[in-house]
Amino acid sequence: MEEFGQLALNNKDTFEEALYKLERVTNLLEEGELSLNDLLKVYEISISLYRFCNNEIDNANQKIKVLAEDTFIDFEN
């Protein structure tokens, strides 16, 4: 049985590291060779990674909106 702990999200992971782990987890799931117990473990890891990545993207979008509002230039006046 493969150990999946190295794929789990940890508090030092960057967006890029979490995305890489999510890609590895996706590959494991697509291979279809996991036992049901391992499948559930890997699925749980994937949900955690997905939520982290999604949150990071939401934060980046929010920052972009704030920056865009702060830098609006009215060229008509």
Image (cartoon, rainbow, N blue to C red):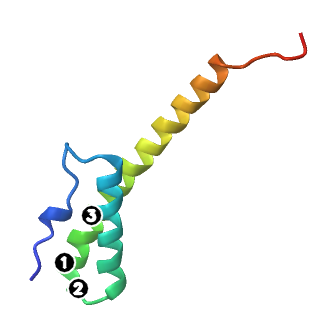
Q: Looking at the image, is mark 3 or mark 2 earlier in the sequence?
A: 2
Residue 67 position by quadrant: top right
Instruction: Tell me the element at label 3.
Output: helix
Instruction: Tell me the element at label 1.
Output: helix
Q: Position of residue 12 (x, y in %)?
A: 20, 43
Q: Amino acid at mark 3?
A: Glu
Q: Which residue is mark 1?
A: 38
Q: Which mark is residue 63?
A: none
Residue 34 position by quadrant: bottom left
The residue lying at 29 percent from left, 79 percent from top is 28
Question: Is 52 positioned to the left or the right of 35 in the image?
Answer: right
Q: Which mark is residue 44?
A: 3
CA gap, disc 2 and disc 1: 6 Å
What crowding class fits label 2: few (fewer than 14 Cα within 10 Å), some (14-19), or many (20 or more)? some
CB atoms of marks 2 and 1 within 8 Å: yes
Q: Position of residue 46 (x, y in %)?
A: 31, 63
Q: Looking at the image, is mark 1 or mark 3 earlier in the sequence?
A: 1
The quadrant of the picture occupied by the C terminus is top right
